[in-house]
Image (cartoon, grey):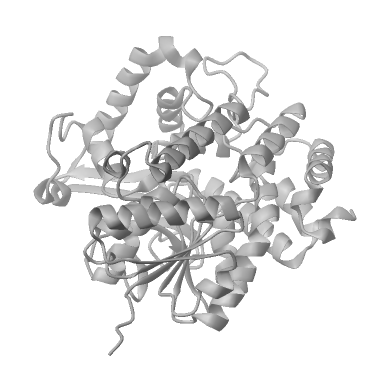
Amino acid sequence: MVTTPYPKVVVIGAGSLFFGREVIWQMTHSEHLRHGCLALVDTDAERLDKMGRLAQLVAAQTGAPLQIEVHANWKDALPGADFVVLSFAVDTVRYRGVDCDISAKYGVRMCSGDTIGPGGILRAMRDLPAVLDCAADVASLCPQAWLINYINPSTVNGIALAKFAPSVKSFALCDSLHMPHIKIRQALLAGIIDDAGQWNAELDSAFDLRIAGVNHFTWLLHARVAGRDVTSQIVDSLRMRRLASRHMDGGGSAKALHNDEIACQLYEVFGKVPACVSHTKEYVRFYQGHGILPGEIPPLKVWETEPRHARHADMWREVDEAVTGKMPIGDFLQRHGPDHATDIIEAMAGGLAHPFYINTLNRGAVGNLPDDAFLELLCDVDMDGPLPRPVGDMPLGIRGLTQQILDTHELTAEAVARADYALLRRALMTDPLTNSITDADAILQELIAAQSAALPAHWRSL
């Protein structure tokens, strides 16, 4: 009798260096995954070959009976899939640089450029059509599978899947709130443990941490230990870190620059601590440099293209060294570990009952936002999917900004799915970073012209 490997995990975009190496690590190490099948899919033949060879070497090194497949076309990989992870992008480093540089000419500064602002809209234009095409094939070829979006803008793609592929079981992910690391990080700030402290089930149970919001715009709504509010301790730690690191701020990357100081300032304004400052600072208008009076915190530094190109080159160099034998596979394995997406797949397939932050429909978790609001929430998750845990209400102010961001993302999803330029323009005018209709129109037209080769044909005739 032939036994079908379980689970079968299909990774579309296996050349994704921020996920491909980690999924190979975890699929070979987890007792709940290593007897399954890992199907790697990529349209770049050279990268696919390297990742396939790497997976075979890692499986041999670890003794995992993992079945490994490589495919250039996802339709060949999907039959029998239990999980399908989307982790691809169209030349994302280069085009994010184009998005950020052109937008900066018109006074819109993005430190990341792939979720909000013109950068988020253009990335959705480049990648969301393929996301929806894949969803249609999942519905046809493996309708029982869970489709997991691991591509930014996570909320836009997640909304689009829920609205335009409702028969497909799907949710969206981002590793910014990876459990238990996000909880441990806040516990360190709160003084619950120190750097040498060991996290354990007792501490985890005692620390009631509730985070909610839109992906990359999430907030600590509740932080208590045995009923005692520790938010002030978290803020005090951020203030101390800010003072200690201020002299080094000039050398930080765009996503890291001034984060502690911005976290403190946003707390003073809204009464809540942002959970993902490196992105949240890009979702608000305060750090765009449009103020009349000088501020202590300078405008956002624009996302750096060349350092990210160099980082990717280093990652591919590591893969090359591993597959050619220059680096022992054991050394490669010591550099890597679990990933947010495969942690969740492991918990679902193995029935481990671990909670994770997942982007999904609100369903009453945040009481004063609609049930169908697409939020990042702590969820219990099993093979029936994610079930959000109750959080409470979103504070006024943050709730209004959250709704504006949700409207922007939903308009973007509809515009791209329907190929509707009027909706696309409305999305950009709704976006919190837009200050001028004329400038926004110019940004949109210039970005579409600069990226015509990466966009569906219907956008090129505008």
Q: Residue at x 34, y 48 (%)?
A: 178
Q: In this view, does 421 lie above or below 188?
A: below
Q: Hey, which residue is sitting farthest front in the picture?
A: 325
x then y, percent, for residue 359 = 45, 59
For residue 340, say whether it is visible: no
- Residue 330 lies in what quarter of the image? top left
Q: Nearer the viewer, residue 368 or 333?
A: 333
x then y, percent, for residue 206 = 14, 48
Q: In which quarter of the image is the N terminus?
A: bottom left
- Residue 42 lies in what quarter of the image? bottom right
Horizontal side of 197 relative to 396 (left or right) equals left
Q: In this view, does 300 lie above or below 38?
A: above
x then y, percent, for residue 76 = 55, 74
Q: Hey, which residue is sitting farthest top in the picture?
A: 247
Q: Hey, which residue is sitting farthest right in the picture?
A: 461
For residue 186, say whether it is visible: yes
Q: Residue at x 65, y 22 (%)?
A: 289
x then y, percent, for residue 328 = 31, 40
Horizontal side of 247 relative to 195 (left or right) equals right
Q: Which residue is drawn at 49% across and 15% down?
A: 251
Q: Hey, which residue is sitting farthest bottom in the picture?
A: 1
Q: Which residue is drawn at 73% across and 61% down?
A: 415
Q: Nearer the viewer, residue 110 or 24?
A: 24
Q: Which of 318 and 233 is in front in this view?
A: 318
